[in-house]
Amino acid sequence: MHDKLNPRMYRSEPLRRCRLEECRAACCIHGAWVDQTEERDILTHAAAVAAQLPADQADPRDWFDGRQESDPYALGGVVQHTTVIPSEDHYGGTACIFLRMSDYKCALQVAAVQMGSHQWRFKPFYCILHPLDLDGQGRITLDETNALLAEPGSCLRPADEPTPLLETFAEELDYLLHLQPQPRKSSSSR
């Protein structure tokens, strides 16, 4: 496991994760990059995903905006961007098309649970990873937190006591390191 984690992940820092009732999925403001293989899987299960969305967001032809980028570390070599829709009720006034404004949950995640799968079955790699990132060697790390903590919509909040980052991000790390293929290095423009 040591070769998959940046040394920073072994530190303790006074941070805690956001809570959905506090942040209302602010991280979904700009949509997400989705690997081609993830996109195909989502579209293969479009009926299950569409059932979790309001009617005006349920057409699979509207889920991806056509922007693509090469990503040599993505399983399919290319990532596609989800559609971002205007949303007056969401942080920043926009949201990923998969965000359910009724409860601020991701339709991909809700669909997976409804199907009896792991909650992240359809969730894009980069969404599971956030607010973690990959360093230049493809190891999981956490970006410098000053900017993250200054951002009102951040997925991190200050905490009273330092907590090991391995504990703070235990659920994501367990999933990414044990259930999924080797983490992929993010493209520099992401």
Image: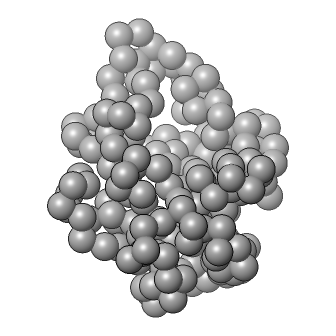
Towards the viewer: 105 or 183: 105
Image point 51% across, 45% down: which residue? 132
- In the picture, the quarter occupied by the N terminus is top right
Query: Where is residue 60 shown, x and y percent of the image?
Result: 54, 83
Left or right: 141 as drawn, with respect to 183: left
In this rendering, position of residue 35 left or right of residue 100: right
Q: Position of residue 181 (x, y in %)?
A: 79, 58
Displayed quadrant of residue 121: bottom right
> Which quarter of the image is occupied by the C terminus?
bottom left
Give whichever of 30, 7 is nearer the camera. Answer: 30
Is residue 135 positioned above or below 87 on the image? Answer: above
Residue under the image location 42 percent in, 67 percent down: 54
Q: Residue at x 63, y 58 (%)?
A: 111
- Residue most extreme to the top: 161
Residue 77 image-quadrant placement: bottom right
Q: Position of residue 177 (x, y in %)?
A: 76, 44
Q: Residue at x 56, y 71 (%)?
A: 50
Q: Give the total number of marks visible in the rendering.
A: 0
Looking at the image, what colour scheme do you see?
one colour
Note whether residue 64 is visible: no
Q: Position of residue 153 (x, y in %)?
A: 27, 44
170 vs 85, nearest the viewer: 85
Asked if residue 111 shows in the view, the reply is: yes
